[in-house]
Image: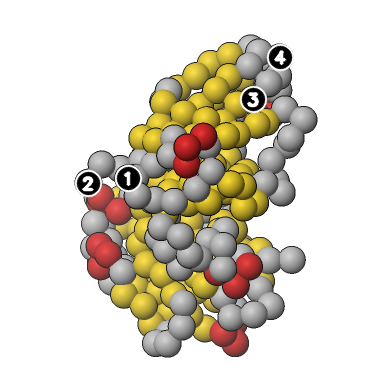
Amino acid sequence: AQSVTQPDIHITVSEGASLELRCNYSYGATPYLFWYVQSPGQGLQLLLKYFSGDTLVQGIKGFEAEFKRSQSSFNLRKPSVHWSDAAEYFCAVGADSGNTGKLIFGQGTTLQVKP
Amino acid sequence: EAGVAQSPRYKIIEKRQSVAFWCNPISGHATLYWYQQILGQGPKLLIQFQNNGVVDDSQLPKDRFSAERLKGVDSTLKIQPAKLEDSAVYLCASSSPGGRSEQYFGPGTRLTVT
């Protein structure tokens, strides 16, 4: 069955430090992968997506993610975290080979930023 | 461009009562999704519409949940009767047709069942 695992429920980093959020997926075919961010009281916003091609994907707000097929991973990175990055981050895989748009989400990682 | 609108933003009801949520998608978006997000979990798809037809409702508890999208625009999601475990945030999203289209999410409705 298709699934997404985010091993870290909660991460705390200092402002200006680098960030890596982990995501592992289970999917038989080539996955369509996404990272979303959710600020308190708001809906989800798409940070970046991977469908094919270059395995290093650039997104909004200075985020990037790297698809590693051998490790079934799609980790999110940012070189320097800002206080405004504090939020919940969700990794998702497109089910049905992306035909329908159905997404399967991980449980999320809460990011706290220390001043 | 206006985003996805949802109402109400918050709702508190007692178990066995009924409740309805409303969603207005982005203009022109043919695909509409309802997700349930339980505290501490990622969103789970309940139902997906393409225009006014259902594409996927495999995870919708049909004995108590119902949804419709008359005229292929606005949508309502209803729970009757509600259970304690229905306490969650209900998110509506919309997109252009096709699996690669970005889904745009509304702010959600936070439901508390007491």
Q: Which chain hosts label 2?
A: B
Name the residue: 30% across, 57% down: A14
- Whole-Å distance between the Cαs marked 4 and 1? 35 Å
Pointer 2 with pointer 1, Cβ within 8 A: yes
- Whole-Å distance between the Cαs marked 2 and 3? 31 Å
* Residue holding disc 2: B1
In the image, residue B35 above or below residue A32: above
3 or 1: tag closer to the N-terminus: 1
Left or right, B19 with reference to B109: right
Tags 3 and 1 both on a single chain: yes
Q: Which chain hosts label 1?
A: B
- Residue in front for this viewpoint, A5 or B4: B4
Tags 4 and 1 both on a single chain: yes
Residue B108 visible (yes or no): no
Residue B105 visible (yes or no): yes
User: Which numbered dot is residue B16?
Assistant: 4
- Quadrant of the snapshot with the C terminus of chain B: top right
Q: Amino acid at mark 3?
A: Ile
- Whole-Å distance between the Cαs marked 2 and 1? 9 Å
Name the residue: 46% across, 28% down: B22
* Residue holding disc 1: B27
- Whole-Å distance between the Cαs marked 3 and 4? 9 Å
Looking at the picture, the colour scheme in use is secondary structure
- Whole-Å distance between the Cαs marked 3 and 1? 26 Å
- Residue in front for this viewpoint, B68 or B99: B68
Q: Amino acid at mark 2?
A: Glu
